[in-house]
Image (cartoon, rainbow, N blue to C red):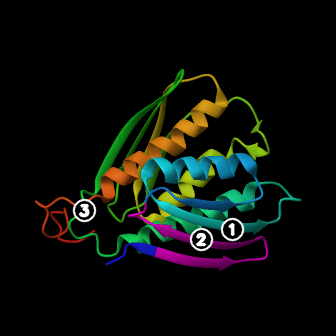
Amino acid sequence: MARTADIRRATNETNIALFFDLDGSGKTEIATGIGFFDHMLNSFARHGFFDLKVKVTGDLYVDSHHTIEDTGIVLGQAIREALGDKVGIRRFGSFLLPMDEALILASLDLSGRPYFVYDVTLTTDRVGYFDTEMVKEFFYSISYGAGMNLHLKQISGVNHHHIIEGCFKAFGKALDEATQYDARITEVLSTKGTL
């Protein structure tokens, strides 16, 4: 069965249409109105081998907060829906990603229990038109929408573009690992019998 999700979400602050395919090839069509955010979502999808289409109309005249946070909420929901019953998947994924001077660890568990740990230091307010404090909010929203335990840790790095892009790429690689099938797993990988 196809592991895909097609989600629409409309509020007074944002209107989002998102298509997600866990078993894609890294094809993307992304338009959020925030160039750097588009670049980050593209990096996530390309390096995770996910197909991702995102169209967001948000209240950018206010700031970038609602657009980025709500996209995280919808992407988290899409990940959860595309995973289905989680039978046969590896469940856990980790990736240590170097990007020039930056080194980022992403580690996750598709446990169904949301938890987010963020150990990343960003000391500038913006990269392009992207508010850097929204990195934390975006991944928090994904972790709770998807029901995943997600850790992001910056081991090194000074260039904010590299640090943030490292987070998105490492997350994509870790999610790709966790969602792969393993022939040894015939049910869900849990002593409880459910995820």
Report x, y in % for residue 146: 45, 65
Q: Residue at x 43, y 44 (%)?
A: 151
Distance CA(mark 1)–CA(mark 2): 7 Å
Q: Which mark is residue 156?
A: none
Q: Front-most of 135 and 179?
A: 179
Which quadrant of the structure image shows residue 18? bottom right
Report x, y in % for residue 30: 65, 60
The residue under label 2 is which amino acid type? Leu
One can see residue 128 in this view: yes
Residue annotated with mark 3: 89
Give the magenta-colored segment's residue range.
Answer: 5-24
Residue annotated with mark 1: 55
The residue under label 3 is which amino acid type? Ile
The residue under label 1 is which amino acid type? Lys
Q: Residue at x 76, y 53 (%)?
A: 34
| Dot 2 alpha-carbon crowd within 10 angstroms: few under 14, some 14 to 19, many 20 or more | many
Report x, y in % for residue 134: 67, 48
One can see residue 121 in this view: no
Q: Is residue 127 left or right of residue 103?
A: right
Which quadrant of the structure image shows residue 52? bottom right
N-terminal of the pair, mark 2 or mark 3, is 2
Pointers 1 and 2 in contact (C-beta within 8 Å): yes
